[in-house]
Amino acid sequence: MKELSLYFHFPFCLKRCRYCDFVSYPRRDRSFHLEYEKAVFQEIAWKVEEESLRGRELSTVYLGGGTPSLLFPEDVERMLNYLQGFFTFSPSVEITMEVNPETVNGDKIKAFQEAGVNRFSVGVQSFNPRFLYFLGRSSSLGQIENVLSSMEKIHCSSWSLDLLYSLPFQSLPEWQQDIEHALIYHPPHLSIYNLTLSPVVPLYSFARRHSRVFPSPDEEALYFEWTMEKLEQEGYIHYEISNFAQPGAECSHNLTYWRGGEYLGVGVSAWSYLGGRRQKNTSSLKNYLRRLEEGKSPLTFQEELEAHQKLAEDIMLRLRTKEGVQSSYLLTRYRRGEVETKLKCLEYLSQEGFIIKEGERFALSKKGILVANQIFQEILD
Amino acid sequence: MDRSKIRNFGIIAHIDHGKSTLADRILEICGVVPKEKMKEQFLDHMDLERERGITIKAKAVRMEYFSPSTGEKYILNLIDTPGHADFSYEVSRSLAACEGVLLVVDASQGVEAQTLAHARLAISQGLVILPVINKIDLPAADPERAMREVEAILGEDHLPFTMVSAKLGTGVEELIEKIVRFIPPPPVEDSPFLRALIFDSVYDSYRGVIPFIRVKEGEIKKGMEIMMFSTRKSFSVSEVGVFTPQRTEVDSLGPGEVGYVVANIRQLEDSRVGDTITSASHPSPSPIPGYKKVKPLVFCSFYPVDYEDYSRLKESLERLQLNDASLSFEADFSEALGFGFRCGFLGLLHMEITQERMEREFGVEVVATAPHVVYHVLSKSGEILEVRSPRDFPPPSEIEETEEPYVEMSITVPAEYLGGVMDLCQSRRGIFKDMVYLSEKLVLLKYDLPLAEILLDFYDCLKAVSRGYASLDYEFIGYRPAKLVRVDILVNREKVDGLSFISPEESAYYRGRALVSRLKELIPRQLFPISLQAAIGGKIIAREDIPALRKDVLQKCYGGDITRKRKLLEKQKEGKKRMKAVGKVRIPQEAFLAVMKSEK
């Protein structure tokens, strides 16, 4: 039976960051959080029946948010125990928790580890207090350094660190300092994103009014080119557009997304991909709780991809990764004529230097990574 | 009908000098329209006319007037005239139906270029001119100055001026008395033949095209077979009548009378303004002089904003044409905008009004390209080509000579702004002809100008350099030699048809450079560097480069992002598909519009 991943969304934060468009609510009292947990447990039981998932092997579990590090270690333990009532855990199961530095200390991290978490993803974003302030982060530089130091102390072998670039007035040397600062802690894994503001976030209108203070796309290209080169020198593998890992430290959970693996998402606004269908839960906490209380489905969106969409999406997701996509893989899964059209497109892009072709494998070149959107648009119908 | 009791007259005035209001007062006094039923500005039927304060098409009203001074009853036919230079032919035909004309001048504004142009038309047709100084009630009124200016343009002193305030009704009765006294009755020209002048027509969906006529000689009545002089087509008259102002049937229309004819005429083509109606059985040997087939001078293409509106656009043009013989159109295709129609107009206002009517009366939203003119190209083989589109402009090696249409431009401008206006005319390749001081403050300037130079923003620039005080009028005076070239735009060394334009040689370099730098802004950066060049024949005159796009990546893409991001990419891809592909380069619609909208 195919492996399954599980995503759990914990939608509460101390305060909302000014750039973040994830579904998040202000932290509530503990009894309310337990009420939410109860609803999630109901959802799990319901989905397992609905999708016939009982007995499937879980290869990864991801506790995201929101700020899941606001949970208590015993909450995590209870959750994992609950899951074991429905699924078997793979021997190499990866259990990741997102951590916001202001919510934990070394002891709490250790307790999470003892509860079963074996991978931490630390939301740093920047080591520069000016940018932390601009982004509306709740964590101080001290709290960040504290958490990162504790990773070494608890001998955690798998953890990650997030950094953001393309911030207002950010110079290349400032960005380089952030990377250098991160490398002091030898993170096995790094996620690097450029600041992207959706219209719903508070910083959006600022960015509209002051677009000139942000690095231009040409400058962003320079920053990212430098980053790719630097991290490669440090032994990191650029295994996905925005993810770098020491060999063996890749995030299995995220690889599931890009390889078209199945995942069950639970909690407010969580997405699932099961049996070729993409589903989304309601983003309203109130509705989520009410529907589950009434024994109703929390889904608000469901789509079944058509064959040609599935093909294009599969190529696009796989091209995000270093391993890329193989023609033989495509030919065994999709209609020959359609695959050949896509292969022709890939061939053409490789002649133009956007894609590297090795044998029957196609992957984005460095130049291609920087303009991946354009490449993906070429591949779409 | 006693011909000596008929007075046929028109009113000419600059826009907003109060022509329609004055007409309303005259109608009221003659009891045609009771005051309470008076829709303001009776003559302006269409909303558009009322809003813009202009009369687009001529109309006629027949009034009965009892003159207290003579104790007699008169028939007054007021023939309204269009108020804009675009329709100068129609104005001249309306005036040809009259014996006299009221020349209305705003007491606060004085004479304007258009007043002059119309007055000249009236003089050339030998009409009696009754000058009227209107709006004397305004605080800024300076009737003395207005009178001096009128005397200057008419070249006569001691004119029978009437001071009126059409708004208040002051002086209007006196004016009507003067119409009876000074404007002569229709001349006695007894002739065995019928000759009636068509000065306008309307389309009625039940009764066909209805010509408005002025009988010069003979008599027209129901049952008669009539013939159109220019087309030689015959029709049977089913009704004749007069405008009271509703159409009212009468037994016959005799010499000097004004009215309409219903004769089951199906096509507007068969009722041409200026044409002569005569009897089919006893045709007159000669028509009334002055008939011309009007040719459009200004062209632009209309494309539906929504592709699906194409047939509605066609239908609306056809329906507009039923009442507007001077509108012409043919199917057209643009790389950027798809299928549409290339339309011919008498001038810019005619074009704007047509576009507005299309949107307002038929609800069709259109994209209009920049107006352009028809160039004449004499090829080396001796052929004369009428070039309407840059596509049809031959390469330099095949051209013997090129010509473009010219207008004579009359501009009235307060003396203090004279310099700016002259600079403007010079910069638009104007040739100075004449300058006359109409009063110590007001100057009349005359320039010959290429029509192409006034199509885009001449009027706006004129208003800007004169703070709104200058007014203009122009008249087509024919084609003149010009050095013209076609400028091509090459995208990655490939010529793009839809981006070519025709330009005078002297400004081709400047325009080419301007367009290329505009295109640099409009064409998005792509995966490849793009070169943009402007060229005349094989010679490159301008170049810009669009560097390759360096970075465009959605960096985050996890479980919840996949659907959203795929949709975003699909949407962007859709946008790309709507662009025109030239080699590897995709050119957005706006780029094609840039060249069509402004060649400046």
Image (tube, rainbow, N blue to C red):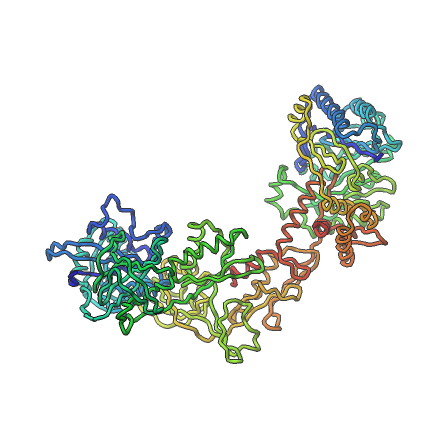
Q: Is residue A317 in view from this perspective? A: yes
Q: Residue at x 54, y 77 (%)?
A: B399
Question: Residue A215, relative to residue B77: is it above or below?
Answer: above
Pick out the residue farthest to the bottom: B381
The image quarter in which residue B273 lies:
bottom left
Q: Is residue B415 in view from this perspective? A: no
Question: Residue A33, relative to residue A212: is it above or below?
Answer: above
Q: Is A327 displayed left or right of B444 in the figure?
A: right
Decide which of B548, A127 is in the foreground and name it. Answer: B548
Residue B76 point in image, percent of width and height: 20, 57
Residue A234 point in image, percent of width and height: 85, 46
Residue B585 point in image, percent of width and height: 66, 59
Count of labels shown? Answer: 0
The image quarter in which residue B522 lies:
bottom right
Q: Is A120 displayed left or right of B144 in the figure?
A: right
Decide which of B30, A254 is in the foreground and name it. Answer: B30
Decide which of B349, B267 is in the foreground and name it. Answer: B267
Question: Residue A115, relative to residue A197: is it above or below?
Answer: above
Which quadrant does the N terminus of chain B fall into? bottom left
Pick out the residue farthest to the top: A31
Q: Is A90 displayed left or right of A161 in the figure?
A: right
Residue B157 point in image, percent of width and height: 20, 67
Question: Residue A146, relative to residue A365: is it above or below?
Answer: above
